[in-house]
C-alpha cells in the first residue's frame, strides 16, 4: 500500500511514457520505408488511414483480413539475443495466409507487448516487421507497444500482427474450383518457418546450454541450432502474385503449409469431392527439419502433420497450365517441386511413397 498522501507516478508503477515516445521516434524511419502511395497521413494518430480507391476498378472487390503471431519461436530469439528477424516471421504468417485467396496485402498493423519497454530493443523488433512488410509490398500503418509490468518479465515480449488484403472476387482462388487431375506444385520453404517450435525447442535448445545452442553444428552445415531455428519464414506474396498475373486462371487454389503441416493444411484447399495425393520423396527436406525430426524420433506420419517438411506453399494448378506455372515461379525466383495430383475423394490428403520422406 502506498504511503498516505504520497504521489505514485505511472513510471513508478512500471510504465515509462517517455521511453514509449523514444520508441516511437526510433521506429519512424522503418515505418516510412514501408509506405505505399495509398497511405494517408503518418503514424501517431488514433487510426491508420489507407485509401482503397483502386477498388473502384474492380468488378466485385473483396477485403481479406488475417491475424497471427509467431508463437514460441520468440523463445529462441530471446535465447540467442537476436530480435531483428522475428518481425519477418510475424508479417509472413499473416500475409501468406491471405495470399491463399489470391489477394494482395495492402497494409499491416502490429501489437508488441513487453515486460519493460526499451526503445532500442523495440526498434530492433520493428525493423524486422518493416523488412517483412517491404518483402510483402504492404504498408505498416500502425501498431501498439504495450508495457505490462507485473504481468510479463522485464525482458519478455510477445508480438501479434494484423493485415488487410484486396482481391477482385472473379479472380479469387477458390477450393471449389479444384478438379481431379489438377497438379500439386510446392514452393520450397526456408526451414521450419514459424510452426512446431514447442516441439522443436523441447528436443533441441531446451536440452542445451546457451553455448551449445549457439555453437556450429555439423548436421546443419555449420550453422548453430539457434541460427537454423531462427531462419525467417519465407514471404511468397510478390512471386505468387506475379505468377497469378503471368498465368491467368492457371492456379485454382493454394494452401499455406503452417501449423498442422501438409496433412492438416492442404486439405483446406480442397473441395469435399477431391483428395490431394502427395508423392513423398519428390522434394528435399531442409536440414533443420530433418535434424529436429531425428532429435524427436518422429514418425513420418507425425512429421507430416507437425512441420511443413520443406513445402511453404502448395499450388493446385490446372494440368495444362502446370508447366507455365513452374516457369513463372522460376522466373520469380522460387524453387518448385511437382509433388502430386488431385484425385476423386472426400477432401483429405493421402500419400504415396511411404518411408521415403526422411530416408
Image (tube, helix red, strand yellow):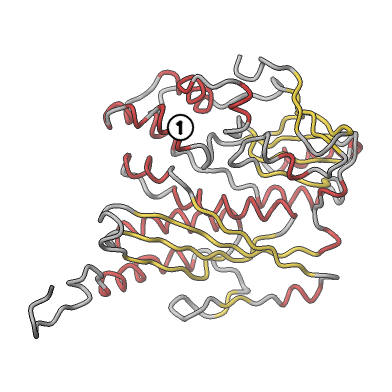
**Quadrant that contains the C terminus:** top right
Q: Is 297 situated left or right of 335 in this image?
A: left
Q: Residue pushed farthest front? A: 1
Q: Is residue 188 above or below residue 116?
A: above
Q: Is 193 situated left or right of 204 in this image?
A: right
- How crowded is the residue under tag 1: few (<14 C-alpha within 10 Å), some, or many (20+)? many
Q: Residue tagged by mark 1?
A: 200
Q: Is residue 284 above or below residue 96?
A: above
**x and y, in percent, of residue 212 in the image:** 30, 26
Give the residue at x 67% y 16%.
356
- Depth check: 142 or 206 in front? 206
Q: Is residue 242 above or below residue 279?
A: below
**x and y, in percent, of residue 317 in the image:** 83, 40
**x and y, in percent, of residue 165 in the image:** 67, 63
Q: Residue pushed farthest bottom? A: 5
- Depth check: 189 or 62 in front? 62
Q: Splitting the image into 4 quarters, where does residue 104 fall? A: bottom right
Q: Splitting the image into 4 quarters, where does residue 358 fall? A: top right
- Disc 1 is placed on an element classified as helix
Q: Is residue 305 above or below residue 167?
A: above
Give the residue at x 56% y 36%.
190
Q: Splitting the image into 4 quarters, where does residue 117 fall? A: bottom left
Amino acid at each position: 500500500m502506498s504511503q498516505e498522501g504520497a504521489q505514485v507516478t505511472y513510471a513508478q508503477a512500471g510504465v515509462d511514457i517517455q521511453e514509449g515516445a523514444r520508441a516511437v521516434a526510433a521506429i519512424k524511419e522503418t515505418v516510412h520505408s514501408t509506405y505505399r502511395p495509398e497511405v494517408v497521413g503518418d503514424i501517431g494518430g488514433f487510426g491508420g488511414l489507407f485509401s482503397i480507391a483502386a477498388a473502384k476498378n474492380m468488378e466485385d472487390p473483396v477485403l481479406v483480413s488475417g491475424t497471427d503471431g509467431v508463437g514460441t519461436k520468440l523463445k529462441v530469439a530471446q535465447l540467442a539475443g537476436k530480435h531483428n528477424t522475428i518481425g519477418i516471421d510475424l508479417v509472413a504468417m499473416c500475409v501468406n495466409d491471405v495470399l491463399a485467396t489470391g489477394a494482395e496485402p495492402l497494409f499491416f498493423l502490429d501489437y508488441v507487448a513487453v515486460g519493460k519497454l526499451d526503445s532500442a530493443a523495440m526498434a530492433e523488433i520493428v525493423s524486422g516487421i518493416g523488412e517483412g512488410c517491404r518483402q510483402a509490398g504492404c504498408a505498416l500503418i500502425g501498431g501498439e507497444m504495450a508495457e505490462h509490468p507485473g504481468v510479463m518479465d522485464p525482458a519478455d515480449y510477445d508480438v501479434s500482427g494484423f493485415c488487410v488484403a484486396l482481391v477482385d472476387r472473379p479472380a479469387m482462388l477458390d477450393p471449389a474450383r479444384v478438379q481431379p487431375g489438377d497438379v500439386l506444385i510446392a514452393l520450397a520453404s526456408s526451414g521450419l518457418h514459424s510452426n512446431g517450435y514447442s516441439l522443436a525447442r523441447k528436443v533441441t535448445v531446451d536440452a542445451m546450454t546457451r553455448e551449445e545452442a549457439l555453437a556450429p553444428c555439423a548436421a546443419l552445415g555449420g550453422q548453430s541450432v539457434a541460427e537454423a531455428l531462427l531462419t525467417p519464414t519465407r514471404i511468397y506474396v510478390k512471386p505468387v502474385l506475379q505468377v497469378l498475373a503471368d498465368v491467368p486462371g492457371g492456379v485454382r487454389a493454394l494452401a499455406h503449409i503452417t501449423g498442422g503441416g501438409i496433412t492438416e493444411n492442404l486439405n483446406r484447399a480442397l473441395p469435399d469431392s477431391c483428395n490431394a495425393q502427395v508423392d513423398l520423396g519428390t522434394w528435399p527436406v531442409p536440414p533443420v527439419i530433418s535434424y529436429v525430426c531425428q532429435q524427436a524420433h518422429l514418425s513420418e506420419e507425425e512429421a507430416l502433420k507437425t512441420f511443413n517438411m520443406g513445402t511453404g506453399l502448395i499450388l493446385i494448378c490446372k494440368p495444362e497450365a502446370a508447366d507455365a506455372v513452374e516457369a513463372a515461379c522460376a522466373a520469380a525466383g522460387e524453387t518448385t517441386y511437382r509433388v502430386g495430383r488431385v484425385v476423386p475423394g472426400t477432401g483429405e490428403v493421402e500419400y504415396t511413397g511411404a518411408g521415403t520422406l526422411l530416408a
